[in-house]
Image (cartoon, helix red, strand yellow):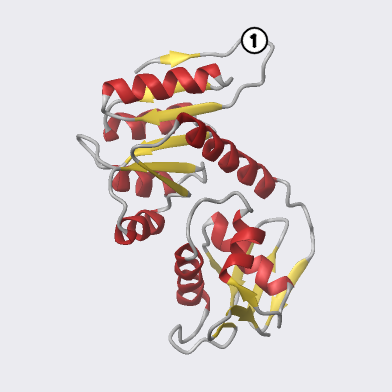
Amino acid sequence: MNTSSAPAHTAARTVLVVEDEASLASTLSYNLRKNGFNVVSASDGLEGLQVARRDRPDVIVLDLMLPKMDGLEVCRRIRADSDVPILMLTAKSEEFDKVVGLEMGADDYLTKPFSMRELMARVRALLRRAGGREAVDDASKITIGEIVLDLRGRSVHRAGREVLLKPKEFDLLFFIAKNAGQVFSREQLLENVWGYDFFGGSRTVDVHIRWLREKLEETPAQPRHILTVRGVGYKFVK
């Protein structure tokens, strides 16, 4: 593992690079440091998981195909106890791979080959969105039937029991619940929940809506609150 620190006068964010291809790992680390980031690195999935838990980086750049433990499994295990933004690198461009990665908890994807400029843009976008999540400090609650959203605690309860949501699931639920009755297209949801600079596709919204229905609706296949408006998008009804 290699570690580098920015000058003391900068409040640099730390990026963990988990990449087994030595030349790419070196290029990524060099460019990240050049752009003011601290960098820690790992050359296999198991080491990457250990470094993530030990160093608590601000963002993780994670290759999909890794020795000892693949990127999907690393992502899944990190998500069990951390909300750190994860940018997954993959040589595969099939939609199936992206959906699987999304379900494991990745926040964004970059398909090889890519430019360093694009990688920097995505890392910064992930950090901005993570900062936006932390800024939510509204102490009010939204109650819809047996569902209660606590905005300050970022928690959700259904029929008195807590429902564990991923950060972006909560953000999406909060947005559509506070705008109950309004129909939003997938593109509008991407812009308002993920940010205008999110690089993923509209399939991201569909996957998160499915997750919310499975966790909150009594009959997910026949939802009462999170509805599909055919040809348009989604809306939340009380």
Front in this rendered view, residue 164 or 14? 14
Residue 47, how many percent across, how many down? 30, 29
Neighbour class for label 1 at 10 Å: few (<14), some, many (≥20)? few
Residue 5, how many percent across, how many down? 53, 13
Q: Residue at x 69, y 11 (%)?
A: 9
Q: Residue at x 40, y 36 (%)?
A: 114
Q: Is residue 103 left or right of residue 94?
A: right
Q: Is residue 1 left or right of residue 175?
A: left
Residue 65, how many percent across, how many down? 25, 40
Front in this rendered view, residue 225 or 205? 205
Q: Is residue 150 above or below residue 42?
A: below
Front in this rendered view, residue 72 or 52? 72
Mark 1 — residue?
8
- Counting labels gives 1
Look at label 1 and name its amino acid.
Answer: Ala
Specify the quadrant of the image occupied by residue 28.
top left
Q: Is residue 143 left or right of residue 110?
A: right
Q: Is residue 170 above or below residue 108?
A: below
Q: Residue at x 47, y 62 (%)?
A: 204
